[in-house]
Image (cartoon, rainbow, N blue to C red):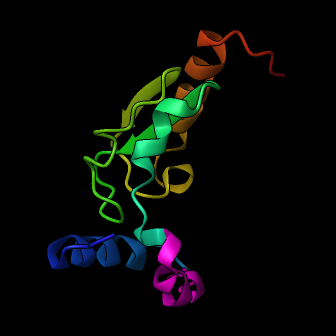
Amino acid sequence: MNIHKENQTKMNATYQEIPNWNHDFSAIGMVHNDYLINFKTFTPAIKIPVLFFYGENDWTIGPEHYKGVLFPNMVLLKSSSGHIPFMENKDDLETAMDIFLNTYKINHP
């Protein structure tokens, strides 16, 4: 994964807005080789329903990372959020989950 300097600056600015943000993972997680693998080539073989929910302001992986993801049973939805939608736009995430569950008729409470 290659994070452009401009994207990294935007990403870091987003995290600075979050009180008590824990930087432990970002300090060690991104040095693992698994983060450098392009897993998109494996997506056509995954047959289970997939919700691919992405943020149009996600500067961690890039807002166009969804391109080339080819899960055959995928609901693709975007949000105005960034990389952490459960904190940035919970309503969009909950709506996306409802759409996904209803699309595949998955029972949920």
Q: Based on the displayed image, in which of its 4 quarters is residue 5 positioned?
A: bottom left
Q: Is residue 101 left or right of residue 44?
A: right
Q: Please state, as top left, top right, bottom left or bottom right, where the N terminus lies in the image.
A: bottom left
Where residue 36 appears, as percent x and y from the top left, is: 41, 70
Q: Relative to 66, does residue 4 appear above or below in the rendering? A: below
> Which residue corresponds to the image point at 22% horizontal and 70% vertical from the top-left?
7
Q: Residue at x 54, y 89 (%)?
A: 28
- Quick check: can you spot residue 70? yes
Left or right relative to 4: residue 12: right
Work out whether 18 lies above or below 55.
below
Q: Nearer the viewer, residue 22 or 37?
A: 37
What secondary structure do most residues of the magenta stretch adopt? helix
Residue at image coords 43%, 58%: 83
Can you tell which quarter of the image residue 87 is in?
A: bottom right
Magenta residues?
21-34
Q: Relative to 25, does residue 63 appear above or below in the rendering?
A: above
* Image quadrant in which the C terminus is located: top right
Image coords of residue 59 (percent x, y): 29, 63
Say which of 13 and 34 sits in front.
34
- The picture quadrant where one finds residue 108 is top right
Percent from the top left, x then y, of residue 97? 60, 28
Q: Nearer the viewer, residue 12 or 20?
A: 12
Relative to 81, 102 lies left or right: right
Based on the picture, tell me whether residue 29 belongs to the magenta stretch: yes
x then y, percent, for residue 68: 30, 38
- Is 14 colored magenta in this rendering? no
Q: Residue at x 47, y 70 (%)?
A: 35
Closer-to-camera residue (102/18)? 102
Considering every residue shown, the one lying at the far right of the view is 109
